[in-house]
Image: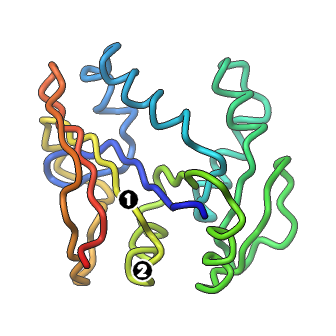
Amino acid sequence: MGKIVSNFFIALDGVVEAPDTWHSPYFNDEMGAVVGAGMETNKAFLMGRKLYDEWAAYWPESTDEPFATYFNTMPKYVISSSLEKPTWNNTTALAGDVDEVRRLKETVDGDICITGSATTVRWLLTNELLDELRLLVHPIAVGRGQRLFDDTTTHRLQLVDSAVLSTGVLNLTYAPAD
């Protein structure tokens, strides 16, 4: 049985939007190893419609190797009530039904990665479908942008692993609290 694992670059103030504008000064070989280790266990991607539209417009034409091949060949699942026929290869649309996502977890042997898609991650947490929340917390307050938790819903989590990287970034892994 697979598990759904969410990954975020996140600022101290909770911002997850546009990490390309604030994350780069903290990326080094050490963080690359953390990201790479996570990629090794991924067997599929799960995403919301907005991220699907962004990635489907970029990765099929990208020459950024080896990432383009990695993203283009990996099975992908999109939670969307409006996407009927995805055009990006190896992509399946899921209507956003909780039972449908549970069935997906039963069919994948390994991690089902979700990166970005904060709204989808909150939905997964609310419906007890997310197994791990991996955060690379950067020592910066961005000040504006979408935050991981921007609603009033309470999500109890327990810390299952932590490390401090040489750049001051915290590598934290949480699981839903029982």
Q: Is residue 70 left or right of residue 114?
A: right
Q: Residue at x 72, y 26 (%)?
A: 62
Q: Quadrant location of residue 128?
A: bottom left
Q: Residue at x 30, y 18 (%)?
A: 30
Figure label count:
2
Which residue type does callout 1 highlight?
Glu
Q: Relative to the observer, which residue lies in front, 68 or 22?
A: 68
Which quadrant is home to the N terminus?
bottom right
Q: Quadrant location of residue 51?
A: bottom right
Tell me the residue that label 2 is attached to.
128
Q: Rate crowding at label 2 as few (under 14), some (14 to 19) or many (20 or more) other CA atoms within 10 Å.
A: few
Say above or below: 44 vs 47: above
Q: Is residue 92 left or right of residue 177?
A: right
Say above or below: 107 vs 173: below
Which residue type does callout 2 highlight?
Glu
Q: Residue at x 76, y 68 (%)?
A: 93
Distance Cα–Cα, label 2 vs label 1: 11 Å
- Can you give x and y, in whole percent of width and height, for residue 59 in the image? 71, 35
Q: Element at badge 2?
A: loop
Q: Rate crowding at label 1 as few (under 14), some (14 to 19) or many (20 or more) other CA atoms within 10 Å.
A: many
Q: Element at badge 1?
A: strand
- Can you give x and y, in whole percent of width and height, for residue 11 in the image? 21, 44
Which quadrant is home to the C terminus?
bottom left
- The reply to whether discs 2 and 1 touch (Cβ–Cβ < 8 Å) is no
Q: Is residue 6 left or right of residue 14?
A: right
Tell me the residue that label 1 is attached to.
132
